[in-house]
Image: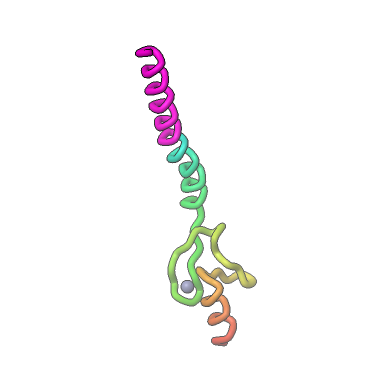
């Protein structure tokens, strides 16, 4: 009986450890990629990761609103 409790406790510890171990790993490569190239929003000047930037020709925007504002403002 005691052995069973130890096994259950171990299984829980392994599950929690795996969960904690996998979370930062999943985020890391993405963060590194995103921090590589930055684009500046042509409307507000905010810097955003190039992959998340909305492109309109050679201009970049941080959001759909700013893309629309940038287009309409000219
Ligand atoms: Zn913006």
Choose between 26 and 12: the one closer to the eye.
Answer: 12
Q: Residue at x 54, y 86 (%)?
A: 73
Choose between 57 and 29: the one closer to the eye.
Answer: 29
Q: Position of residue 5 (x, y in %)?
A: 37, 19
Quick one: which residue is furthest to the front in this view? Answer: 1
Is residue 8 found inside the magenta-colored segment of the image?
A: yes
Would you identify the image quadrant in which residue 70 lies? Answer: bottom right
Q: Residue at x 39, y 21 (%)?
A: 10
Q: Say how the picture is coloured.
A: rainbow
Q: Is residue 6 left or right of residue 22?
A: left
Q: Residue at x 62, y 72 (%)?
A: 56
Would you identify the image quadrant in which residue 11 lies? Answer: top left
Q: Residue at x 47, y 48 (%)?
A: 31
Please state the extent of the stretch shown in magenta in the rendering. 1-21
Quadrant assignment for the C terminus: bottom right
In the picture shown, does residue 20 fall above or below 47? above
Q: Is residue 38 left or right of residue 20?
A: right
Quadrant assignment for the N terminus: top left
In the picture shown, does residue 22 fall above or below 56? above
In the picture shown, does residue 22 fall above or below 45? above
Q: Position of residue 17 (x, y in %)?
A: 40, 30
Q: How many marks?
A: 0
Main SS of the magenta part reads helix
């Amino acid at each position: 009986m005691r052995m069973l409790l130890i096994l259950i406790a171990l299984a829980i510890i392994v599950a929690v450890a795996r969960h904690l171990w996998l979370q930062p790993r999943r985020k890391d490569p993405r963060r590194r990629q995103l921090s590589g190239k930055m684009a500046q929003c042509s409307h507000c000047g905010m810097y955003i990761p190039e992959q998340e930037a909305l492109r309109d020709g050679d201009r970049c925007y941080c959001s759909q609103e700013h893309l629309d504002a940038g287009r309409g403002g000219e």
